[in-house]
Image (spheres, rainbow, N blue to C red):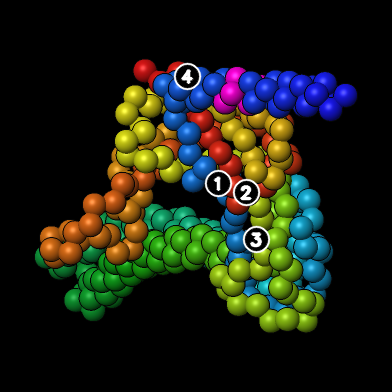
Amino acid sequence: MKTAANKNSNKVLSLTAISIVIAAAICFTLYLVNGTNYEETNDAQVESYINPVSARASGYITKVMFEEHQDVKKGDTLVVLDNREYTSKVHEAEAVLEDAYAQIKVLEAGINVAQTGVLVNRNQIASAKARLWQQKQDNLRYKKLLTDEAVTGQEYEQVKTRYDVAQNDYDATENTLLSTQSRVQELKTRKALVIADIKRKQAILELAKINLTYTVITSPYNGKTGRKQILEGQQVQLGQPLVSIVNENEKWITANFKETQVNGFYVGQSVKIEVDAIPGKTFEGRIKAISASTGSKFSLLPADNSTGNFVKIIQRIPVKIEFADSKTIQEVKSGMNVTVAVLNKK
């Protein structure tokens, strides 16, 4: 009995050893095959746009209409500021603009009056011209009669005086016409200045209305809010960040491959993606862009090998990878670690 049991035990051990050897051989073979067709790195993370929504106006917060990590849509109201000061500025700008429009009406009425005066002056000139012609003829006639001693010198002087008065009246009406025409031109110039001023005041009103809209802060796109760090009654300043919005509709991976791995990579190349937090699921992707330099060159303090303290370190090349199907990545969160394998190298 012991001999048979020992034989069975030895047989099991032998089969187990053989299975282990076969599995190891298969794994080694797959490693060799994959090693020639795959370039893999686990130095990769999921990225997305995380933009802070900043205040475009200063004031007190009256309402905070979001919670932490809340799904929001483009245009959803996030924060409401006290708008009374901005509303008053709109009303003030409207009143100033109405005053300018009233000035235009006054000037237009003045222009109409002055233009009517021009017509009256022209009629007066015509009358004065006719009287002047009559007095001129009388003056010539009496001057001839005086030569013939048919009239006295006193009578001629009276006629000549009336002629001189008619001449002065004619000159005065012409000067009055010129003055009235100058008045018309002056009023038209003032009207042009007021029209230009109206454009400026319209711009001020438009700016006041725009600033009023800034008291309601909305989401710039669909996404999910970050941490809530503001409360009602808090004073915010122009440009102050209020909340961050994570864009859930656009995600990609930044994979840092060794410089010895990227030879043969090309845009559009297929990629397999495994997310550490989602085991057993593989995502499809493709290379979107390959960096023109190593990651260290983008750092604030790039290494300076000319100092003499040189240690050769394999550099990393950032590669941007996009998911093939953006609809299947809702469970993938920004910042998650992933492992990517580039397939079918040229």
Q: Label 1, label 2: how many angstroms apart (C-alpha)? A: 5 Å
Residue 244 is tagged as 3
Q: Secondary structure at mark 3?
A: strand
Q: Label 1, label 4: how many angstroms apart (C-alpha)? A: 26 Å
Q: Residue 100, relative to residue 133: is it above or below?
A: below
- Magenta stretch: helix, strand or loop mostly: helix
Residue at the spot of label 4 = 33
Residue type indicated by callout 4: Val
Residue type indicated by callout 3: Ser
- State the image quarter where residue 62 is shown: bottom right
Q: Label 2, label 4: how many angstroms apart (C-alpha)? A: 29 Å
Task: Assign the N terminus to one quadrant of the image.
Answer: top right
Looking at marks 1 and 2 on the same chain, the residue that comes earlier in the sequence is marked by 1
Q: Residue 103, relative to residue 45: is it above or below?
A: below
Q: Residue 160, relative to residue 213: is it above or below?
A: below
Residue 18, magenta (yes or no): no
How many other residues sit within 10 Å of disc 2, few (<14), some (14-19) or many (≥20)? some
- Is disc 1 in contact with disc 2, using a CB cutoff of under 8 Å? yes
Q: Secondary structure at mark 1?
A: strand
Q: How far across and how far down the image is residue 207, in percent?
A: 58, 64
Residue 20, magenta (yes or no): yes
Q: How far across and how far down the image is residue 313, in percent?
A: 29, 51
Looking at marks 2 and 3 on the same chain, the residue that comes earlier in the sequence is marked by 3
Q: Label 2, label 3: how many angstroms apart (C-alpha)? A: 18 Å
